[in-house]
Image (cartoon, helix red, strand yellow):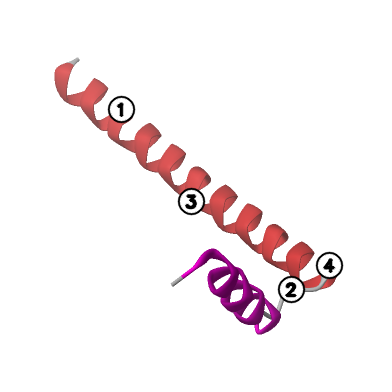
């Protein structure tokens, strides 16, 4: 396969791609931020609980 054919095929495949709109990107970004914040809060609470339990056990 030569370079010209490869470039032509790449352009053909790229024309089939459906890119997200600004609204979709914004919605996905906000969703990711919310999920990360919830997981971080959960892990912080688990860490706090575990450290409190270990402090109580070890004195």
Residue 18 drawn at (x, y percent): 70, 80
Asked whether, in this view, residue 1 is left or right of residue 12, the answer is: left
Residue drawn at the location 74% of the way across and 73% of the way down: 20
Q: Give the camera-side residue of 25 and 8.
A: 8
Identify the residue position indicated by label 3 in the image: 39
Give the mark, 1 or 2, whose residue is nearer the N terminus: 2
Residue 26 drawn at (x, y percent): 78, 63
Against 31, residue 39 (above or below) is above
**Callout 1: few (<14), some (14-19), or many (20+) C-alpha neighbours within 10 Å?**
few
Query: Marks 3 and 2, how far apart in space?
Result: 26 Å
**Callout 4: few (<14), some (14-19), or many (20+) C-alpha neighbours within 10 Å?**
few
Identify the residue position indicated by label 4 in the image: 22
Residue 34 occupies quadrant: bottom right
Q: Is label 3 in contact with label 4 (beta carbons under 8 Å)?
A: no
Q: Is mark 2 on a helix, strand or loop?
A: loop
Q: Give the camera-side residue of 1 and 54.
A: 1
Against 28, residue 45 (above or below) is above
Query: Marks 4 and 2, how far apart in space?
Result: 7 Å
Q: Which SS does the magenta portion mostly show?
A: helix
Q: Which residue lies furthest to the left in this view?
A: 58
Q: The magenta stretch spans which residues?
A: 2-16
Identify the residue position indicated by label 2 in the image: 20
Q: What element carries label 1?
A: helix
**Callout 3: few (<14), some (14-19), or many (20+) C-alpha neighbours within 10 Å?**
few
Asked whether, in this view, residue 37 is left or right of residue 25, the answer is: left
Give the mark, 3 or 2, whose residue is nearer the N terminus: 2
Q: Residue 51 carries which label?
A: 1
Q: Which residue lies furthest to the top in this view?
A: 59
Query: Marks 3 and 1, how far apart in space?
Result: 18 Å
Give the mark, 1 or 4, whose residue is nearer the N terminus: 4
Select label 3 or label 1 by which is in front. 3
Select label 3 or label 4 by which is in front. 4
């Amino acid at each position: 396969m030569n370079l010209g054919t490869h470039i032509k095929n790449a352009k053909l495949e790229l024309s089939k791609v459906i890119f997200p709109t600004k609204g979709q990107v914004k919605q996905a970004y906000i969703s990711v931020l919310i999920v990360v914040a919830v997981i971080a809060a959960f892990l912080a609470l688990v860490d706090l609980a575990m450290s409190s339990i270990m402090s109580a056990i070890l004195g």
